[in-house]
């Protein structure tokens, strides 16, 4: 696309193509269970067991509030998600996975991880799923797998491009530091 390797146009093209191809691959994995990529994002976010306000789920799943409400309604109908009034702020509604939702997420997570492992990408948690990593790339941080490092770098880029994401990124970093699941390891946030 550009005569200069690493030009911004190349980055944009590569990120867009990678997102489209990965979405297509994961969409095929999830299609057998009639789960959309958007529903998968919601399940992954809720898999941490903390319950999340619908406004946060909307941002993390990259869905407008109305679309998210319809999607969560469908997940509620399938007994994968339930809603409760926030005990601290009764004006807010929090979404949680049901027991069935946790089992389905765990089952689907295995399938998604296996599909990603077929690409040779090591597991985000660091143990690896039988891959050689991302083309043998070295991580920028000690003890971090190449895939986790890549996700971290992309999150950093998103934070720099979208200042509203900085607070969310700091909160995610705190969860990861506290031993909580990374959004993709458990894609929030993809």
Image (cartoon, grey):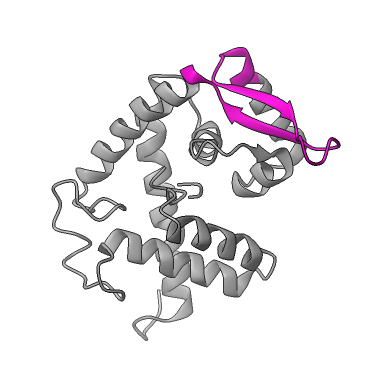
Question: Does 88 sit left or right of 154 as displayed?
Answer: right
136 within the magenta span: no
Residue 176 vs 152, above or below: the answer is above
Question: Does 119 sit left or right of 103 as displayed?
Answer: left
Residue 116 coordinates in the image, percent (x, y)? 27, 44
What residue is rendered at 53% in x and 41% in y?
45
78 within the magenta span: yes
Residue 95 coordinates in the image, percent (x, y)? 65, 31
Residue 46 coordinates in the image, percent (x, y)? 54, 36
Q: Nearer the viewer, residue 28 or 13?
A: 28
Residue 78 coordinates in the image, percent (x, y)? 56, 14
Residue 91 vs 132, above or below: the answer is above
Of all residues, the one furthest to the bottom in this rendering is 4
Screen quadrant of the N terminus: bottom left
What residue is rendered at 38% in x and 55% in y?
18
What residue is rendered at 40% in x and 79% in y?
2
Residue 81 vs 7, above or below: the answer is above
- What is the total number of numbered labels drawn onto the structure image? 0
Residue 112 vs 178, above or below: the answer is above
Q: What is the magenta range?
A: 74-100
Q: Nearer the viewer, residue 30 or 96?
A: 96
Question: Does 167 sit left or right of 131 as displayed?
Answer: right
């Amino acid at each position: 696309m550009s005569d200069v390797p690493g030009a911004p146009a190349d980055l944009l093209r590569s990120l867009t193509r990678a997102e489209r191809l990965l979405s297509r691959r994961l969409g095929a994995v999830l299609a057998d269970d009639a789960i959309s990529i958007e529903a998968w994002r919601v399940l992954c976010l809720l898999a941490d067991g903390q319950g999340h306000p619908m406004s946060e789920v909307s941002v993390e799943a990259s869905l407008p509030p109305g679309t998210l409400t319809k999607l969560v309604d469908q997940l509620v109908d399938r007994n994968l998600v339930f809603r409760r009034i926030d005990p601290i702020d009764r004006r807010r509604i929090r979404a949680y996975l049901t027991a069935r939702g946790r089992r389905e997420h765990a089952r689907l997570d295995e399938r998604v991880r296996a599909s990603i492992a077929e690409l040779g990408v090591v597991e985000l948690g660091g143990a690896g799923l039988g891959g050689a990593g991302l083309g043998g790339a070295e991580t920028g941080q000690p003890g971090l797998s190449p895939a986790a490092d890549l996700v971290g770098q992309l999150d950093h880029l998103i934070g720099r491009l979208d200042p509203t994401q900085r607070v969310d990124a700091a909160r995610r970093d705190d969860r990861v530091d506290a031993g909580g699941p990374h959004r993709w390891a458990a894609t929030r946030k993809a």
